[in-house]
Amino acid sequence: MPTESAELSLLSIISLLSFFIFLIVSKFSANIKNGVLLDGDFEKPQAFHSKAIPRSGGLAGIVSLIIFFILYFVLFEKLLLDYIFLSFGIFSLGFLEDIKFKISPLYRLVLMITILILFIFFFTITISGVDLPFLNMWMRNPLFSGVFVLLCFLFIINGANLVDGFNGLLTIHLLIINSVLMFLNFENGNSNLGWIITAQIVVLFCFLVFNFPRAKMFMGDGGSYLFGSLLAYNIIETTNQNLNLSSFFFCILLFYLFFEVFFSFFRKIYLKKSPLKPDNKHLHMLLFGFLEKSKRFKDCNYLNSLVINSAYLFLIIPGIFFRNDGSVCRYLFFFLLLFFLMFYFFLNKYDKKNNL
């Protein structure tokens, strides 16, 4: 078992190396293949920047994680093959979009499902139990269990990609959730998982330095897919290794990423739009419009990220205190969904009123 001093030394090395990797990538990624990584599309619905910025955060992130996986194996003779497979597979799919290798949204979803099915099958990824007895019965069926885990990954990965539109928005959100997971695992003696999650936090912090408040690089699809998939796996592993925690507590942690995708899907169907194509009616985009139209703030980009994540942190704090109480967590989860809807419809009404 890794010792604490060895892990701290490893994290110190990863912190230093990751910072320089992000620094180098931010400096030179604009020159790669005639600027193929530069995001210069200012007309797309999710564009809120005014100059071309490289979508290379995911590239620097995967390089940093590769170094961590190698050093972890060298020091502790333990190959994190599950994390390696997931990281490479999902990152590669997103990175194709970053280098402007166009894949239709449908084909990309099919490829993502294929990679995740292989991952779930070969590494026997399951969820030990949930707070709903009837669902626990169905989870004994390998097919249902596999589909359930697959949907968990899809919602979190696509949720991460969907909210990645403003400086620091996704990264700060990932840092909050992973920090809670890190604390819970160390608290309950699951130090191995705790250190792995801590390494991801270190890499995310290094990226944040170059993305917030002013963006020198974006995470890109490769980065949002990468860290979204790792978050999903961190949640599943934390659930399985901390059975004293309510499964609805993890729903609370993920309510924003999950419900943004879920609500957006059915909202677009209701409006007779393709649920696979982006638009500018997501919560974080409407809030940006609200802040911008108030004309009280000079830079609403990073302020938007601070408002959403501060509100999110405030809302989940009761869940952290009652993380072992399934009933409280269940009611809090549904309250958060209701709060999301009320806030969304308020912002949407404001947006329509001011765009007449």
Image (tube, rainbow, N blue to C red):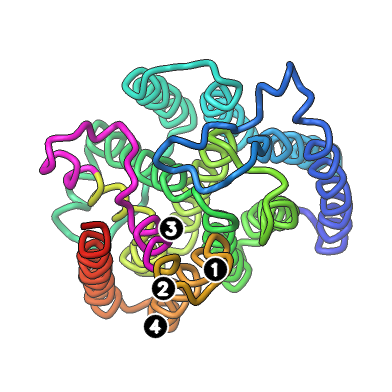
Q: Which mark is residue 303?
A: 1
**Residue beneath label 4, please?**
318
**For the residues marked 2 and 1, what is the alpha-carbon distance in whole angstroms?**
13 Å
Given residues 76 and 218, the one toward you in this image is 218
Work out whether mark 2 precedes mark 1 in sequence or the reverse, and give the earlier one.
2
In the rendered image, residue 88 lying in the magenta stretch gets the answer: no
**Residue beneath label 2, please?**
294
Amino acid found under the numbered disc labelled 2: Ser
Work out whether mark 1 precedes mark 3 in sequence or the reverse, and give the earlier one.
3
Query: Residue 156, percent across and down?
Result: 40, 47
**Would you place residue 148 above or below residue 309 in this image?**
above
Query: Residue 166, percent across and down?
Result: 53, 53
Work out whether mark 3 precedes mark 2 in sequence or the reverse, and give the earlier one.
3
Amino acid found under the numbered disc labelled 3: Thr
**For the residues marked 1 and 3, what is the alpha-carbon distance in whole angstroms?**
33 Å
Given residues 59 and 330, the one toward you in this image is 59
Work out whether mark 4 precedes mark 3 in sequence or the reverse, and give the earlier one.
3
Q: Which mark is residue 239?
A: 3
The residue furthest front is 356
Which segment did they paint magenta?
265-290
Front tag of 2 and 4? 2
Amino acid found under the numbered disc labelled 4: Pro
